[in-house]
Amino acid sequence: MLMVEQLQKSFGGVAALDGCSFNAAESHITAIIGPNGAGKSTLLNCISGATKPDRGRITLFDNNVTAEKPHRLARAGLARTFQISRELSSLTLLENVLLAQQSQSDEHFFAPIFLRGRILKEEKEATQRAMQLLTRVGLERLADETASVLSGGQKKLLELARALMLNPRVVLLDEPAAGVAPPMVQVLIEVIKGLQGKGVSFILVEHNMDMVAALSDHVVVMAEGKKLVEGTFKDVTSDRRVADAYLGGVL
Ligand SMILES: Nc1ncnc2c1ncn2[C@@H]1O[C@H](COP(=O)(O)OP(=O)(O)O)[C@@H](O)[C@H]1O
Ligand SMILES: [Mg+2]
């Protein structure tokens, strides 16, 4: 489904990615782990089109999508989660999901009042779909509340619902469990599993090893900008090189 070949990305003199290659299979959850500074976020940013790699190639469903714009990637079936910004916090959950289409494709800033005008024009069909997605992540009761009332974990669920509005085949998740209370991590795990059951594939960057253990079909361990080891969760966590990388890394 996704092939990353020899990605290279430097910031000043620092090589964030230094020949990173890996493959992710369709309908799998592929986890990317590794110590801080390993290049995981840079890798996700390159795949999602937010960062342009200096070198290398990214192939999605047999199309070369290297340095492709995010809205074109969205059309090719790839979505990522975004943090719910301050502007979006003042809108309701339903409005947030309805607006996902624009915010994935558009980097422009819209004042909430202007957003509301757009929402009024949305079709009934889109509203129904947004409600279905809120139901799928278990937030339907809160559809008319503003996003500012949500806990950290509920915001992650809302981010997921927003990403799903584009009907993606692949979703990129950067640390969905970060800052989320343990019971909510379990909810997130169940929701992501359920979506995988519906045919959605995931690339998951995560430090929470309970989540990685519960979800990953395949684990890629990164260190110093490239793949160090890959395999099942069991394989990689019993690998000496992985333990060494975490000890050597800035934790
Ligand atoms: N925008 C940037 N400007 C300068 N350096 C960056 C930038 N993004 C990442 N880096 C550097 O690249 C390396 C990899 O960072 P990152 O991809 O965030 O790693 P991870 O997500 O695995 O912690 C780090 O040394 C980081 O400081
Ligand atoms: Mg990171």
Image: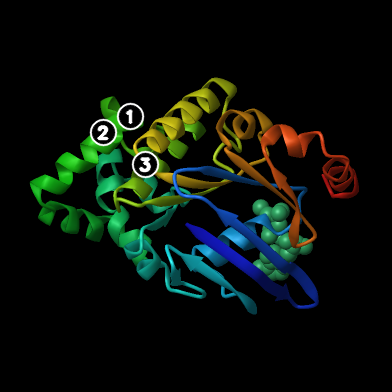
Task: Name the residue beneath numbered marker 3.
Answer: 199
| Residue 65 in view in this figure | yes
Determine the residue located farthest toward the top in the rendered image.
Answer: 183
- Of the image marks 3 and 1, the number of the one nearer the N terminus: 1
The verdict on label 2 being within 8 Å of ligand 2 is no
User: Could you tell me which residue is drawn at 42 percent across and 73 percent down?
Assistant: 69
Q: Nearer the viewer, mark 3 or mark 1?
A: 3
User: Could you tell me which residue is drawn at 51 percent across and 34 percent down?
Assistant: 152
Which residue is nearer to you in this view: 64 or 102? 64
Task: Name the residue beneath numbered marker 2.
Answer: 143
Tell me the distance, in whole angstroms, between the alpha carbons under discs 3 and 1: 21 Å
* Displayed quadrant of residue 217: top right
Q: Quadrant of ligand 1?
A: bottom right
Report the side of 102 relative to 186 (left or right): left
**Marks 1 and 2: in contact by CB < 8 Å?**
yes
Q: Amino acid at mark 3?
A: Gly
Q: Secondary structure at mark 2?
A: loop
* Mark 2 Cα-neighbour bin, 10 Å: few <14, some 14–19, many ≥20: some
Q: Amino acid at mark 2?
A: Ala
Task: Name the residue beneath numbered marker 1.
Answer: 139
Report the side of 19 relative to 69 (left or right): right
Tell me the distance, in whole angstroms, between the alpha carbons under discs 2 and 3: 25 Å
Q: Looking at the picture, how far across and down is residue 188, in whole percent?
A: 48, 30
Which residue is nearer to you in this view: 75 or 178? 75
Which residue is nearer to you in this view: 4 or 17? 4
Q: Looking at the picture, how far across and down is residue 63, in whole percent?
A: 43, 71
User: Could you tell me which residue is drawn at 84 percent across and 44 percent down?
Assistant: 246
Q: Amino acid at mark 1?
A: Leu
